[in-house]
């Protein structure tokens, strides 16, 4: 039962990432099934994150390189990549996390999974990572479109 429940939630999150990024940026990402790290480690540079409150509380994170973030935020806003400020990138990555969490919430409507979400925030820094002090159950998924990579993380806290 627990495995089926986790698969269902992972499929909703995966679908949310693919649908949201496809809609806002016109980029078709594909999920790669192999990825469940002990800590959310990234060589990217930007992570959009938010807390999810419900039956189980979790941290949802979407990590990508600054270049990939610029391409997606540019498509999302219609502003040329060279015209995007650092603040635009940070806000855009936070908004991606917000839209993915919102889409997942909509996909879960009527299923018994109810949760509230906080305002999104962005973590910035090359080779940054998130370390959880407790043995938190974690889900990690990688998505690619050509050379672009997005890492989605969900850690129950």
Image: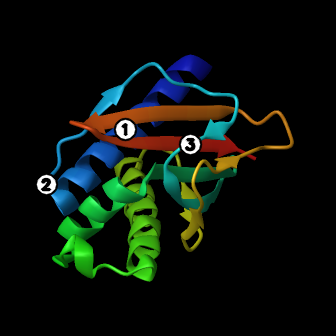
Asked which secondary structure carries label 2, the reply is loop
Residue in the picture at 51% in, 24% down = 35
Coordinates of residue 96 in the picture (x, y in percent): 38, 62
Q: Is residue 155 left or right of residue 122?
A: right
The N terminus - image quarter: top right
Coordinates of residue 149 in the picture (x, y in percent): 36, 41
Q: How many angstroms separate mark 1 from mark 2 (CA)?
A: 16 Å
Q: Is residue 12 left or right of residue 136?
A: left
Q: How many angstroms separate mark 3 from mark 1 (CA)?
A: 19 Å
Coordinates of residue 50 in the picture (x, y in percent): 58, 62
Color scheme of the displayed model: rainbow
Q: Earlier in the sequence, mark 3 or mark 2?
A: 2
Coordinates of residue 63 in the picture (x, y in percent): 48, 50
Q: Earlier in the sequence, mark 1 or mark 2?
A: 1
Residue, disc 2: 26
Q: Nearer the viewer, residue 154 or 79?
A: 79
Q: Are marks 3 and 1 in contact (CB under 8 Å)?
A: no
Above or below: residue 71 compared with residue 59: below
Residue, disc 3: 42
**Which numbered mark, 3 or 1, is in the foreground of this view?**
3
Residue in the picture at 56% in, 74% down = 119
**Crowd around label 3: few <14 · some 14–19 · many ≥20 (10 Å):** some
Above or below: residue 4 compared with residue 119: above
Q: Which mark is residue 149?
A: none
**Crowd around label 2: few <14 · some 14–19 · many ≥20 (10 Å):** few
Q: How many angstroms separate mark 3 from mark 2 (CA)?
A: 24 Å
Residue, disc 1: 14
Q: Can residue 1 be seen in the rendering of this structure?
A: no
**Crowd around label 1: few <14 · some 14–19 · many ≥20 (10 Å):** many
The image quadrant of residue 33 is top left
Residue in the picture at 29% in, 68% down = 73
Asked which secondary structure carries label 1, the reply is helix
């Amino acid at each position: 039962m627990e495995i089926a429940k986790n698969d269902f939630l992972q499929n909703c999150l995966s679908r949310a990432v693919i649908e949201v990024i496809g809609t806002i940026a016109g980029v078709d990402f594909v999920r790669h099934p192999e990825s469940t790290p002990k800590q959310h480690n990234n060589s990217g540079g930007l992570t959009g994150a938010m807390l999810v409150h419900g039956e189980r509380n979790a941290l949802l994170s979407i990590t990508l390189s600054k270049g990939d973030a610029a391409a997606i935020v540019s498509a999302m806003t219609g502003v040329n990549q060279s015209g995007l400020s650092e603040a635009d990138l940070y806000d855009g990555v936070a908004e991606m996390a917000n839209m993915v969490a919102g889409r997942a919430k909509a996909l879960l409507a009527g299923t018994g999974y109810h949760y509230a979400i906080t305002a999104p925030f962005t973590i910035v820094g090359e080779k940054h990572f998130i370390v959880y002090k407790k043995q938190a159950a974690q889900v990690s998924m990688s998505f690619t479109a050509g050379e672009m990579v997005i890492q989605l993380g969900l850690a129950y806290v």
